[in-house]
Image (cartoon, rainbow, N blue to C red):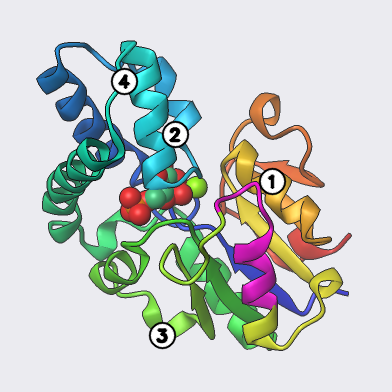
Amino acid sequence: IIKACIFDLDGVIVDTAKYHYLAWNRLANELGFEFSIEHNERLKGVSRMTSLDILLEVGGLTYSNAEKVVMAARKNEWYLEYIYKMTPDEILPGVISFLTMLREKGIKISLGSASKNAMLILERVQLQSFFDAVIDGNKALKAKPDPQVFLLAAQELNENPTNCVVFEDAAAGIEAALAAGMKCIGIGSPEILGRADKVVPGFENANIELIKF
Ligand code: G6P
Ligand code: MG
């Protein structure tokens, strides 16, 4: 029986993938290439530094660690320009009513995100009050598909992983949830998220039946 829900942030609660893409492509352009949108799927759910490695691989470029740290920081500054402008209007359809329903049913709620900007984004869209726990990229140091982020969420909620369900839009996140021994629901397309226990396009019309297995 499900007692806790753990939500990925980017692509599940808000669509920040478009902002990540714009900022990464700006970096790529500065380095002299175009990071086409088709490659963007590979950046979903993976850490900032791994994203940079993927970007540089696409561009066929190699840099030292020190240079990469500077590049990642610049990308994040550009990304934050978009994040500071976010408003609650950007919460994906159906999310607020789904979270409200979970609260009413006494189901615990955590965030489980690789992003170091997760807290800021939750504040911008005014969703912090829904979360009993927030595990972000500052707390979880091992990147998805490692299960650490979700296991820490379960620990903070004081729940057994088998009683938790994870909501994820990225293949790496689905693998992380499975490795944590949790149920998992893919948000997006079955072609990419086929390993999830269920896949739905989003939270519109979602009700308690969604978390019954
Ligand atoms: C999420 C996104 C990734 C992003 C990662 C780190 O998992 O899906 O695309 O790279 O967070 O985000 P950050 O905000 O710390 O750069
Ligand atoms: Mg995501």
Q: Position of residue 174 (x, y in %)?
A: 69, 46
Query: CA gap, disc 3 to disc 2?
Result: 28 Å
How packed mark 2 is, by other alpha carbons closer than 10 Å (few <14, some 14-19, many 20 or more), is many
Q: Which badge, 3 or 4, comes first in the chain's sequence? A: 4
Query: CA gap, disc 1 to disc 3?
Result: 26 Å
Q: Position of residue 41 (x, y in %)?
A: 48, 28
Q: Which residue is mark 2?
A: 43
How packed mark 1 is, by other alpha carbons closer than 10 Å (few <14, some 14-19, many 20 or more), is many
Compared across the picture, whether 74 is left or right of 12 comes to left
Q: Nearer the viewer, residue 29 or 203?
A: 29
Query: CA gap, disc 2 to disc 1?
Result: 14 Å
Compared across the picture, whether 17 is left or right of 67 comes to right
- Name the disc covering residue 174, or none: 1
Label 2 amino acid? Leu
Q: Which residue is mark 4?
A: 62
Q: Which residue is mark 3?
A: 129
Q: Which badge, 3 or 2, comes first in the chain's sequence? A: 2
Q: Which badge, 4 or 2, comes first in the chain's sequence? A: 2
Query: CA gap, disc 3 to disc 4?
Result: 43 Å
Q: Which residues are magenta?
A: 143-154
